[in-house]
Amino acid sequence: MVLRVTGWPTQKSNGWQAAAVIISIDSISDGSTVDPAEMDGILVNGKGEIPKLWDIIACSMQGQVPRRESVAGGFSMRKYLSGRGIRWTGKLDSYEILKTQPMDMLLFPSEHLLAPVRSESLKTITSYLPRRESLLFSSVLFADKNSDSRIVKSSFTETGTAHLFAVSGLHVGILVSVLIAIASLLPTPNRITHILVIFAVYYYTVLAGLPVSAVRAATFATVSLLASQMGRKSDSLHVLSIIFVMAVMWYPESTADVGLQLSFIATGVILVGSRYVMRLKNLNSCVKPLIVLLFVSTVAYWGTLPIVAKYFGSINILAPLINCIAIPVFSAGVWLTFIALLVPIPFVQESLLALGWLPIRFTEVMINWISKVDALQLTVCVDSVASISIYLLITALVLVIARTPIKFAVSIILMAGIVPLFNPSLVSEPQSEMTVIQFDIGQGDCALFRFPNGSNVIIDTGAGWPGGDSFSRGPMQWMKQQGITNISDLLMTHNHLDHTGGTNSLLSAFEVETLWCGGDSHKLFAGVYQQPSAGDTIQSDGEWSLICLFPEADFNNQNENNNSAVVGLYFRKSLRGVWTGDLENEGEEHYLATATGSEHLDVLKAGHHGSKTSSSNNFLNYFAPSNIMISCGVENKHNHPSHGPFYTTQDTIKLHRTDFGGTQTIKWSETGLFHGIEPTFLDTMQIDLYYPVNSSTI
């Protein structure tokens, strides 16, 4: 396979990552339902020499359809990448950066005009600024992101100021104003100045990796500047509409890109809101800029509410006020940084960057502090007929009444005051069923037990990695959308990262009443916890109980898997389901040695992701389950499940796998009747399959 790199490569802890396009493909293995084709976009990961933008690579690789959402309505890497023109992801087994002709129309400007400037700018930022601020500025100005910068960004996301962290229209606007301000000091005609500004804006947009919001802002600025040169007044809303239509016609799938949705909607409502603000009269000239900023921030907050609710699940109720402070302060820092990078004099750069650091640091400290106030975070959901109707009604009302200062103030209060009504916990109906949700969390484990009395219990939190975890990418967002704010009990079965990786994210997002630490998992956390042992009741609502079955209080095994806490779900005194963590055969035999009688389960969650080291014949025959649940990742490196067929002396047992069916929902009626197991995905075309892709020598 031959690729051309189409995005600036990003360094990662274990190599590099870059967007690319397939320009030649020789062969792929049989069995893939959909094959890659030439000109398809692909996100590649490699180790070794880092290519440059527009380099050509000959490679052999493992390709994959991007991962779907782990739970209905959750984050979908497939949709996210599709909106950016990327249909595949791949891991390079081996590759060679091909030598191209010196005048390659794409590679030549990259090597001589773009890469050196980008590299030198990032080096300047890293040299003169502290680590946190250098990560922030690298991301803000050049979209240079890694796991560390995502950690810095998290507090911005929680306070509704994540747009500051991205290369957005705001920053392109700042660049245009900086360039025009500098050009005004020079004896050049406006026409030449505007042409140079347009060139500089597009040059910068390519340096930043062509993010959607920057391309939109650059096109907007171009049309506006050209219209002024032709003596025509352009209507900003018309220009925005034309740009949107062009973007959709050029690449229809871009409408799935959340960044594009937020960028165009926020800009559109700001432009509409600005027209209403300009109608206000009798306002003090000193007060009016503040009123304008507050209203613009509020309408942007209100206009993007449905999308923010859908993709992020929560908002900060002070977001409009926070933006009123953060936008001008942050913009000052970006202004100074742009000027510093444009002036190639070391002591001037150092001075300007030091000045730019002050407002940025102030903004970061303010946002970090606000993000820690849990009372300001509000779970919202705007997807029901009732909530959408209320949203549209309030929007229409504001458009009608916001025509005088008093009515204007009333409209702001109305928009801010109505937001708490979108909290799903206010409209969610009480459930009478016992529900267990086995999340599709990749190669890991995470289950949510929802009791009829409203109690929620989490068993394990999936895998973690530097800068992220699988729990926060799917289950956490879905739980917020369901109005879940409190976790009665959190049980970590044992001390392995694929079971505990999302625990910190969970503890920071939800109030947890009791923390249970199985095996050695208590070593990961400082605080009050309980060690589960056989006989302990994890949670009970009278009819339904979740009880620890294993290990005994004095049990300890050298293999941490065999220290896994095993829990059973009871209806009255009848055992209906068992969750076994990573318990292996040795641990199973210890349990069976003290067990009496026999059981017949509705569902058994197979130990160790369906590995052949677990779920022995004796264990299966003792429990005689009707259904086996397996939590594992698609084509995982451990080749789980490796058990083979699951069967008892009577029959083969039906399997339910998260890698095939996605998140699995298990339900029992209020009388204990088993309703079955429902997968998220029934269409096998949605299964994520790896396949080898090979290349020959070019």
Image (cartoon, rainbow, N blue to C red):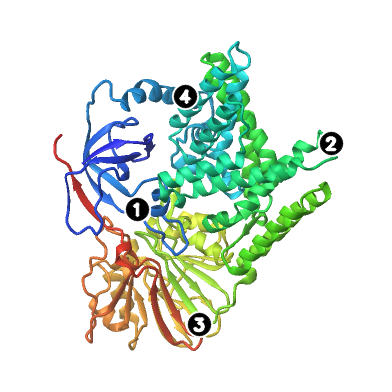
Q: Amino acid at mark 1?
A: Pro
Q: Nearer the viewer, mark 2 or mark 3?
A: 2
Q: Residues within 10 Å of mark 4 (few under 14, many from 20)?
A: some
Which residue is denoted by mark 2 in the rendering? 284
Give left or right: position of 382 versus 245.
right
At 17% from the left and 56% from the top, the residue drawn is 30
Q: For the residues labelled 3 and 1, say whether their Cβ atoms are less than 8 Å apart.
A: no
Give left or right: position of 175 versus 602.
right
Give left or right: position of 439 versus 374.
left
Which residue is denoted by mark 4 in the rendering? 121
Q: Nearer the viewer, mark 2 or mark 1?
A: 2
Q: Earlier in the sequence, mark 2 or mark 3?
A: 2
Q: Earlier in the sequence, mark 2 or mark 4?
A: 4
At mark 4, the secondary structure is helix
Which residue is denoted by mark 1 in the rendering? 66
Which residue is denoted by mark 3 in the rendering? 544
Inter-mark Cα distance, 4 to 1:
32 Å
- Front residue of 72/293: it is 293
Decide: is 426 above or below 230.
below
At mark 2, the secondary structure is loop
